[in-house]
Amino acid sequence: MTSLFRTGDLAQLDPLIGADLRISVGGEQRRYIDLDAAATTSASAGVVRAVQEFLPWYSSVHRGAGAKSQYTSARYEQARETIVRFVGADPATHVGLFPRNTTEGLNQIAFRLGLTRDDIVVTTAVEHHANLLPWQRHAQVRVVDVDRSGTYDVAAVVAALDERPTPRVLAVSGASNVTGWMPDLAAIAAAARDRGVLVVVDGAQLVPHRPVDMAALGIDVLAWSGHKMFAPFGASGLVVDRRLLADGEPFLVGGGAVKAVSHEEVIWADTPDRDDAGTPNVVGVVALAAAAEELLAGGARNRLHEDLLVRALDDELATVPGLRRLGPTSGDRLPVAAFVIHGMPHGEVADRLSREHGIGVRSGCFCAHPYLSRLFGLTPSEVQQFHDDARVNRADRLPGAVRVSCSSATPLADVATLGEALRAITASRGDVLGRPAATAGRGR
């Protein structure tokens, strides 16, 4: 796989804004420990500097003759080139767009493909809702299921691709936002390409952690989020094969997306302007490009540090009484872990980590309900009960887990602090550690 994932030099990531933030915990001031990077990351100092240096020049894009407008337009197009290069795409065949987030990017491409209810999209049970709901809205989905460990193999994907009718699209996540597990993208994409099936990858979790080479992997479309890679300024990346955008109406219509308009006719602009209606978030785009350059430079060092974080998480969580991990705990993974603690509702664990230890984590189903249902081994009747409870807003009855997630900027010491906190919490609840795990999973 080394030929498919590029690495940069050993430059270090700039410190994160708020890394020294202090909060009140039990009446004393403590440094806030952020272990929710899979949801969002703070801005790096380098990204903030890039924004601050750009702000005096901020102006309209592609619509003004003044020096500020010309400079802003140049920076915007330069950023487009940067994100294409960042993910190893060929600028001759692929183009970069700037949706607000991965969800918007996947909705945009699902619309632009002109799918019908007769079309088949192969996706998997691992997916975040962002890589499931847009496809369900426009086409039929054929789901590759997972085994008891929460993973699937290439053979399962091949079997789904070979079913009839032949699918138009294969839509997969590069890494799970729940467990950090990564499928074999190279083999999966090759199987789809051999069958003439378009490959769309949700890179929201993968891109901030692993340098990706779209050309080598054979990916046609890749979407990812700036707010998960130290650029939380409202812009994200969508790199698309230009041919897919050559015809048809854009997802959003308005100024900038056209060559000519009358009350009877619209002449759409060429790619990428056609898919760039309205005044864009240039500040966010500048931030995204700065973060991309920073991650490219820090590739090798970041990977080594994240591997240490994975091992540290495994070691610490293994020492917590009553804790059950969800998903695989071996192989190449991102520094993400989901778990339940027997007899303790997931929300209570997350709340106590915050109130008593100043540690921020996530609890719930992480916008991946089908995947969590499988990881918990819920029966069809239990899934139906899940839906019935949600319908009447019985949040206290919904299943869920606790997720801790790190970035390349997470100190190893924070993982050790997490372990100490979880052991303290379980020690104080020793009377309930014998209760069934299903109680914790259901969140009751």
Image (cartoon, helix red, strand yellow):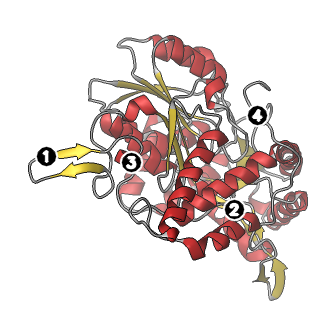
Q: In front here: 290 or 111? A: 290
Q: Which residue is mark 3?
A: 273
Discs 4/2, front: 4
The residue at 83%/43% (across/down) is: 303
Q: Secondary structure at mark 4?
A: loop
Q: Quadrant of residue 232?
A: bottom right
Q: Is residue 29 above or below residue 297?
A: below
Q: Which residue is mark 4?
A: 6
Which label belongs to residue 265? 1
Q: Is residue 288 left or right of residue 398?
A: right
Q: Which residue is mark 2?
A: 361
- Residue at the far bottom in the pictured view: 27
Mark 2 and mark 3 in contact? Answer it, CB < 8 Å.
Answer: no
Q: Is residue 381 above or below residue 320?
A: above
Q: Amino acid at mark 1?
A: Glu
Give the Cα distance between marks 3 and 4: 30 Å
Q: Is residue 149 left or right of residue 111?
A: right
Give the Cα distance between marks 3 and 1: 18 Å
Q: Secondary structure at mark 2?
A: loop
Of the two numbered discs 3 and 1 on the same chain, state the one appearing first in sequence: 1
Q: Quadrant of the N terminus?
A: top right
Q: Is residue 325 above or below residue 406?
A: above
Discs 1/4, front: 1
Of the two numbered discs 1 and 4 on the same chain, state the one appearing first in sequence: 4
Q: Secondary structure at mark 3?
A: helix
Q: Residues within 10 Å of mark 4 (few under 14, many from 20)?
A: some
Give the Cα distance between marks 2 and 3: 39 Å
Of the two numbered discs 3 and 4 on the same chain, state the one appearing first in sequence: 4
Q: Quadrant of residue 21?
A: bottom right
Give the Cα distance between marks 2 and 1: 52 Å
